[in-house]
Image: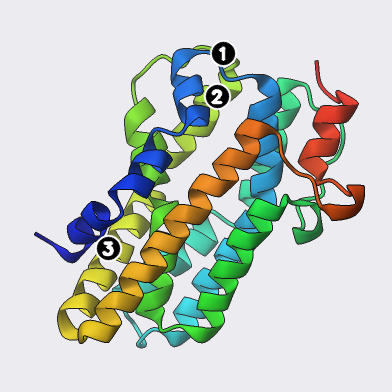
Amino acid sequence: MSFLQECRRHCADVWEAYRHHPWIEAMAAGTLSPERFVFFQLDDGPHVAEFNRTLALGIAKAPVGHAWAKAAAHVLDDLSTVGELGEKRSLVEEIGFRAEPAFDRWTCSPAREGYLNHLVRVGYEGTFAQIAASVYPCSLFTEVIGERFAGVEIPGPPAYRRWADMYTRRTRTEMCAAHAHVVERAAAEGGAAERAMLQRLYRRSLEHQVRVFDAAWELDGAWPGGAVAQAARAVAAEDYP
């Protein structure tokens, strides 16, 4: 059994909560509301820049010419922050959302900001292998969304299909495989403390992944004192039909 297989078994409860989240199951069943879809996309926008920031920090820490660094650089080039945010704008506009998304860290939900802060902290403090472990659960969208919905009819607006297809792109599947290779090698060459750290980072990222889906499912973008995330404001204002 590989190290990542051990991680998945150890975190089986969180993995199943991620893989079969009600938000994802609703999309499969044709019952996902446009409000929940738009909430996720608007809340996910700030994630794109911080995820790419974390990859860039990993590139700086990786050995020169390392295959993981090349794959990460390809992601930053082929799936640029500007390009991916443009795709998200197109998705929400297609649904009928009319306001201009801000897509910065100040507009996201508490759950999403927690995830962003987790990734960036690992980016600054961790090794490049630990960075790979922390971003790997997000890259598993290639499995949780891409593989699951490939060739499958998705009831609802065409934007749902376009979003799912984003996670079948070769650039993303190659990056996911590169993360896995780096984590496996670090686990094999490191001691018990390093293996424990890699597993903790993997689990915490999974936990954050579930929490951001929870926020989108519950339309929960509220902050103390009455402030709300952009996604929650959009739902409240009914900025789309």
Residue type, numbered disc 2: Tyr
Badge number at residue 76: none
Query: Do the numbered discs 1 and 2 sit on residues whose CB atoms are within 8 Å?
Result: yes
Residue at the image position 79 percent from the left and 37 percent from the top: 232
Badge number at residue 160: 2
| Residue 1 vertical position relative to residue 163 in the rendered view, above or below | below
Residue at the image position 61 percent from the left and 55 percent from the top: 48
Closer to the N terminus: mark 1 or mark 3?
A: 1
Query: Do the numbered discs 1 and 3 sit on residues whose CB atoms are within 8 Å?
Result: no
| Residue 56 vertical position relative to residue 202 in the rendered view, above or below | below
- Residues 13 and 188: in front is 13
Q: Please give the residue where the numbered disc 3 appears in the rendered image.
A: 180
Q: 10 Å neighbourhood of mark 1: few (<14), some, or many (≥20)?
A: some
Query: Do the numbered discs 3 and 2 sit on residues whose CB atoms are within 8 Å?
Result: no
Residue type, numbered disc 1: Gly
Q: Please give the residue where the numbered disc 1 appears in the rendered image.
A: 156
Secondary structure of the residue carrying tag 3 is helix
Residue at the image position 50 percent from the left and 21 percent from the top: 26
Q: 10 Å neighbourhood of mark 3: few (<14), some, or many (≥20)?
A: many
Locate residue 164, reporting x and y percent: 47, 32
Secondary structure of the residue carrying tag 2 is helix
Locate residue 13, reporting x and y percent: 33, 46
Residue at the image position 85 percent from the left and 40 percent from the top: 100
> Which quadrant: the C terminus?
top right
| Residue 39 vertical position relative to residue 110 in the rendered view, above or below | above
- Left or right: 191 in relation to 104: left
- Left or right: 82 in relation to 158: right
- Residues 29 and 67: in front is 29
